[in-house]
Image (cartoon, grey):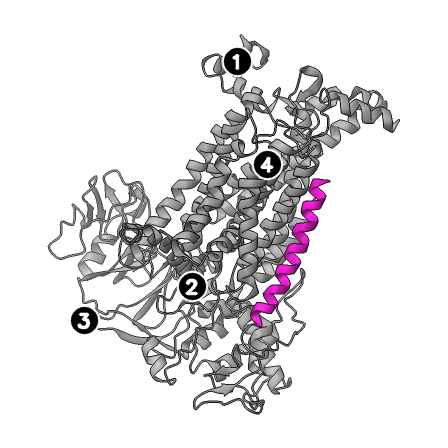
């Protein structure tokens, strides 16, 4: 069968019985990819790389970490001071967490811009949102482990979100804590779950890739590939392109790790947790700030919590909110404007989440929050009906050829 | 095009956030931070051993009466340029608790290089009781546990002064230009000439404060030099 | 990337005349990647080695003056038991009665002690790491009156040398020195 294409007899023998090489060949070699992908399509592979870096450094850190309230902070300091290269491994873990979110946010915005969530890729998109949710849970629990002031108070505040649930809220929080405050049982279970969840993410990532390969990548002009003339093999063309992205990513990550390792952290987390004293300004890690801003924008406890979770939940139904048959924003002039407004809105929410909840910041947070939901719930459904889109090219090859001719 | 736009937005957002960080640090009250040109800043940054040794002396003679430095062991002093014999001699001046011995008793013995530096108080409660209820923080991570660590520490140490008109300073509190809220429970620790340097360098308040800050930065981030060295090798490797 | 070479006919006319240059770039890229990967892997492996604080604790000081003749104490060094025995003249004589070169792990008694009456050995059987019996007065001491490992039946003599059983070598003598007449430092 297909195994015949491998020249190495050992590979052929194995592949005949366990077609892993055929599988690899399909996913990373011959896999037909639209020939017009731009660099915005690099962030998927970079997210995968981030996950691998996180798992590898995380497993290594767990060898020296002690999940106990009396020793956690000290064991992290031991990693930073005494364990061979421990400081390097921890700084890589810390900073890759941030880079992971940067990459994933760009990946999400790419999907929003080019309509990658639309039929037939709805499940692909939904799996992506599931990964995003798992990432947030993992990152949150990981941040608790060093048991600094921000760890402790972050854990307290976030677990207390569940107390907003009517009737059973308090019991749920006690259940999450395994006690009556964030304490040793909480730390222990967070460590266990923090170790588990990356592997769940890896599992969903595999499903994400399987779903991706069902219909292939979307592309910048958002129309389906219509045959061989529209695609090129993944290898070498996109492996090379991915390697360029990887090199760039690793370079930026190295700059962060070696020269600004604590720039994306908070100084208060170098103070051991003190259950008797909350720091003056508590803020979550930067990648949670937009959601934190939404939480604080609402003057009602339950309302804030619901809206915050709603901000993510809304992404699940996005494929059915935006009914426009045109995927790419290139051919949707009005949508494009609103996309950039949403992008600015998200950045604004991130900025406001880091500000104290007082004065003008509260008002601005409310406006930005309102705009976020307005975009998804009102603007997108209306655009689907009223926007007049530009004519789509006949095929991917056509505009490419047209520009080539024009250039000549 | 999209990529470019996104990066431009992110970079401007980061710079805005960066500036806002400064603003937050300056949030409570009238706070001014002095910016100093430290030898350890920049990508080729390195520690100044002589300054750290002097800073260690300032720590021992001025700070150590109230502030512990619990994540440091005597053996770490090798980073400051002390040799093994010197470290042993320094350690031997301290007593640490060991035991239990054959009779089940805890006993005191001279410290060894592997021991942590002993704390001035047995526990937080004793520390509070001796300091009007205020807890002198541990100093091993202080340079990383405060925004703009070294500049902040330096500014705090030289930032004592008379309160401006109309500001009421309660008993047991002191006016400081760098401390958030301007009222600090720690009395001015450094006045100048508090210690005598054997290398003959200046012992005015600024020099002592700079030296002890240098020492504390090292205590918080002992791997800074090797980090930056590997960083330069990594980033310029390709 | 090897495929790139064959696909690149159209890219450069030089390729046919100078296949070496392109191969060189490909090989150099792979080599660079390999060096980078190895450099990145090293910290992840090296972190399993003993940390600085573990290494710093690697010495133990013991006051040996309190061990009376015929008695033995066990102290901890690097997390392992170290046997210190104050040997009787009879035990010393028995250790020297046999020609060391005829033993399974040939060694003379005097090569194993700094002072004949004080024997210091790591109390870990060289077979598979159990702690031999023989420290307490009531213990089984084996056929040679030294130590006996209950796990797989190794007999050690009064010098801690293997005499009978599966252990391949004598009980290890740790590095130690006399700080004063009464105090030794192990490690």
Dot 3 crowding, Cα within 10 Å, few <14, some 14–19, many 20+: few
From the viewer's perspective, is the residue at label 3 or at label 2 nearer?
2
Circle 1 residue: A12
Q: Identify the mark nearer the N-term, 2 or 1.
A: 1
Circle 4 residue: A382
Q: Are tags 2 and 1 found on a single chain?
A: yes
Q: Are tags 1 and 3 found on a single chain?
A: no
Q: Chain of mark 4?
A: A
Q: For this view, does A218 lie left or right of residue C182? A: right
Q: Secondary structure at mark 1?
A: helix
Q: Identify the mark nearer the N-term, 4 or 2.
A: 2
On whether residue B7 falls in the magenta region, the answer is: yes
Contact between marks 3 and 4 (CB within 8 A): the answer is: no
Q: For this view, does A270 lie left or right of residue C95? A: right
Circle 3 residue: B103
Circle 2 residue: A149
Magenta region: which residues? B1-26
Q: Position of residue A346 (x, y in %)?
A: 58, 49
Q: Identify the mark nearer the N-term, 1 or 4.
A: 1
Q: Chain of mark 1?
A: A
Identify the residue at horizontal 18%, vertical 71% (top origin): B103
Contact between marks 3 and 2 (CB within 8 A): the answer is: no
Q: Secondary structure at mark 2?
A: helix
């Amino acid at each position: 069968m297909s195994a015949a294409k491998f020249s190495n007899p050992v590979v052929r023998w194995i592949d005949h019985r366990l077609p892993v090489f055929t599988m690899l060949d399909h996913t990373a070699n011959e896999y037909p990819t639209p020939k017009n992908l731009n660099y915005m399509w690099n962030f998927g592979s970079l997210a995968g790389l981030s996950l691998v870096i996180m798992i590898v450094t995380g497993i290594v850190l767990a060898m020296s970490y002690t999940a106990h309230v009396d020793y956690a902070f000290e064991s992290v300091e031991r990693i930073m001071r005494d364990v061979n290269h421990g400081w390097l491994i921890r700084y890589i873990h810390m900073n890759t967490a941030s880079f992971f979110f940067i990459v994933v946010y760009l990946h999400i915005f790419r999907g929003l811009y080019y309509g990658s969530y639309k039929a037939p890729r709805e499940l692909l998109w939904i799996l992506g949102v599931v990964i995003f949710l798992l990432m947030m849970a993992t990152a949150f629990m990981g941040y608790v482990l060093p048991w600094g002031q921000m760890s402790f108070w972050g854990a307290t505040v976030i677990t207390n979100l569940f107390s907003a649930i009517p009737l059973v809220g308090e019991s749920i929080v006690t259940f999450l804590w395994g006690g009556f405050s964030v304490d040793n049982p909480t730390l222990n279970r967070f460590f266990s779950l923090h170790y588990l969840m990356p592997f769940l993410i890896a599992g969903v990532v595999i499903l994400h890739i399987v779903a991706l390969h069902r219909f292939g990548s979307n592309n910048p002009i958002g129309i389906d590939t219509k045959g061989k003339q529209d695609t090129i093999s993944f290898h070498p063309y996109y492996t090379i392109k991915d390697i360029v992205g990887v090199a760039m990513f690793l370079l930026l990550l190295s700059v962060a790790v070696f020269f600004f390792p604590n720039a994306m952290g908070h100084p208060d987390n170098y103070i051991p947790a003190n259950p008797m004293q909350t720091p003056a300004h508590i803020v979550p890690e930067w990648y949670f700030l937009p959601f934190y801003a939404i939480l604080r924008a609402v003057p009602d406890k339950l309302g804030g919590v619901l809206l915050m979770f709603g901000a993510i939940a809304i992404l699940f139904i996005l494929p059915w909110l935006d009914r426009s048959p045109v995927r790419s924003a290139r051919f949707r002039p009005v949508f494009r404007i609103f996309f950039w407004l949403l992008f600015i809105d998200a950045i604004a929410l991130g900025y406001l989440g880091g500000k104290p909840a007082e004065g003008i910041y509260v008002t601005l947070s409310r406006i930005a929050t309102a705009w976020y939901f307005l975009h998804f719930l009102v603007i997108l459904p209306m655009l689907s009906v009223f926007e007049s889109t530009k004519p789509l090219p006949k095929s991917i090859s056509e505009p490419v050829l047209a520009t080539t001719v024009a250039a000549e | 095009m999209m990529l470019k736009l996104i990066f431009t937005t992110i970079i401007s957002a980061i710079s805005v956030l960066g500036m806002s960080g400064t603003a937050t640090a300056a949030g409570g009250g009238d706070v001014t931070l002095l910016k100093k040109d430290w030898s350890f800043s920049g990508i080729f940054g390195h520690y100044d051993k002589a300054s750290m040794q002097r800073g260690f002396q300032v720590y021992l003679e001025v700070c150590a009466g109230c502030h512990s430095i619990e994540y440091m062991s005597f053996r770490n002093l090798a980073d400051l340029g002390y040799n093994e014999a010197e470290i042993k001699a320094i350690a031997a001046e301290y007593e640490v608790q060991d035991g239990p011995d054959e009779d089940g008793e805890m006993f005191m013995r001279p410290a060894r290089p592997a021991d942590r530096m002993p704390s001035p108080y047995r526990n937080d409660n004793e520390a509070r009781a001796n300091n009007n209820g205020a807890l002198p923080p541990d100093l091993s991570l202080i340079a990383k546990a405060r925004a703009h660590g070294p500049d902040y520490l330096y500014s705090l140490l030289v930032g004592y002064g008379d309160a401006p008109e109309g500001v009421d300073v309660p008993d047991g509190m002191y006016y400081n230009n760098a401390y958030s809220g301007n009222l600090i429970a720690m009395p001015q620790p450094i006045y100048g000439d508090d210690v005598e340097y054997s290398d003959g360098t200046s012992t005015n308040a600024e020099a002592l404060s700079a030296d002890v800050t240098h020492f504390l930065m090292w205590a918080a981030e002992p791997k800074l030099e090797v980090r930056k060295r590997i960083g330069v090798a990594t980033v310029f490797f390709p | 990337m090897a495929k790139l070479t064959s696909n690149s006919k159209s890219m450069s006319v030089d390729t046919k005349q100078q296949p070496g240059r392109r191969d060189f770039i490909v090989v150099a890229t792979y080599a660079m990647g390999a060096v980078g990967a190895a450099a990145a892997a090293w910290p992840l492996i090296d972190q399993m080695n003993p940390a600085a604080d573990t290494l710093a604790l690697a010495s133990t000081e013991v006051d040996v003056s309190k061990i009376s003749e015929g008695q033995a104490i066990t102290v901890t060094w690097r997390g392992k038991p170290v046997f210190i025995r104050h040997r009787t003249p009879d035990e010393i004589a028995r250790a020297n009665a046999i020609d060391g070169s005829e033993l399974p792990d040939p060694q003379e008694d005097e090569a194993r002690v700094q002072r004949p009456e004080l024997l210091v050995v790591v109390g870990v059987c060289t077979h598979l790491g159990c702690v031999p019996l023989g420290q307490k007065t009531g213990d089984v001491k084996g056929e040679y009156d030294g130590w006996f490992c209950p796990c797989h039946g190794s007999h050690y003599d009064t010098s801690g040398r293997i005499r009978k059983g599966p252990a391949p070598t004598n009980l290890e003598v740790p590095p130690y020195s006399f700080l004063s007449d009464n105090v030794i430092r192990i490690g």
